[in-house]
Amino acid sequence: MSGRHIDVPFEADTFGSCPAVTEVLSRVGDKWSMQVVIRLGSGSLRFNELKRVVTGISQRMLTRTLRGLERDGLVSRTVTASVPPRVDYELTPLGHSLWNPVAVLSSWALANREQIHQAQERYDAQENNDNL
Amino acid sequence: MSGRHIDVPFEADTFGSCPAVTEVLSRVGDKWSMQVVIRLGSGSLRFNELKRVVTGISQRMLTRTLRGLERDGLVSRTVTASVPPRVDYELTPLGHSLWNPVAVLSSWALANREQIHQAQERYDAQENNDNL
DNA sequence: CAGAATCCTATGTGATACTG
DNA sequence: CAGTATCACATAGGATTCTG
């Protein structure tokens, strides 16, 4: 796939007095959920596979993140009773529909990482002149 | 404007071993930044105007959020020395480029709010059978 | 392998009161 | 008007240890 299109038919004002946005974004907005959704975009993964590809995540946080996503109906959890046990995580249809928005935002993040970093350095340099 | 198009030329794998995504998303991922960016999309606003339109935000958090966005080069702060003082906040070009990705995600959030809510209720109902 | 349990710290967030 | 300062609390997140 070479290019994906996403319509944004809303005006800025459409997001009106909407705590709903905050509400949903607070799930997607934590440190790990987006990364997990991105990685699951290419197919189902087992717990430790996810742990490997989501750089820096702790076991605890991966568990918590997956539970959260499962609760929100974004990820499905499939247990295969065997020894050793096998648990596969996969995006639900709803989860897949989230993949695009998340990918858009991540692309932006990657593309503008350097600019942001530079802006931060400029900002911090100014602050240092005032303080101390 | 009836529809905006955003290309996502990345494969899932492009987001590779990327703490960069986490890094940038942790700013945009807090409780308020996205809302502020959305509201500033239609033009500059004063401090108290923002406080009014960003539902539920406290004075303290608005200040902190704006400082963060300013530090990242997403928002510019213009002080007009007068009595009473006037401070205008506006998206920078970089901030404007973020508006689209954020709008995409917010649109998704609004569109799927109800589905998520239902999924949560199903999940919680199951949990209650097991516990207590 | 896939986690659960426990402990601990840092940060986010809100409420309130005060200021130039 | 546009903040700052302070306190107080909940949650996020990591490290470590244990288990079916």
Image: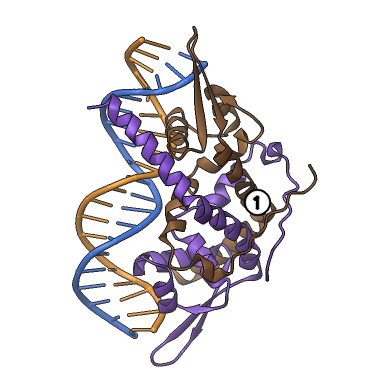
Chain colours: A purple, B brown, C orange, D blue
Residue at x 70%, y 36% (from the top left corner): A13
Q: Residue furthest right?
A: B2
Residue C6 locus on image (x, y percent): 24, 64
Tag 1, which chain? B
Q: Secondary structure at mark 1?
A: helix
Q: Is residue A13 above or below residue D17?
A: above
Residue situated furthest top in the rendering: B83
Q: On screen, B26 above or below B59?
A: below
* Residue on which disc 1 sits: B104
Q: Position of residue C13 (x, y in %)?
A: 43, 39
- The front one of B129 and B64 is B64
Are there few (<14), some (14-19), or many (20+) residues within 10 Å of tag 1? many
Residue A10 spot, x, y in % from top left: 73, 44
Q: Front-most of A83 and B27?
A: B27
Which sits in the foreground, C15 or A123? A123
Report the side of B114 relative to C4 (left or right): right
Which quarter shows the C terminus of chain A? top left
Using the rendered image of the protein, determine whether residue B128 is visible from the camera's viewpoint.
no
| Residue B64 appears anywhere in the view | yes
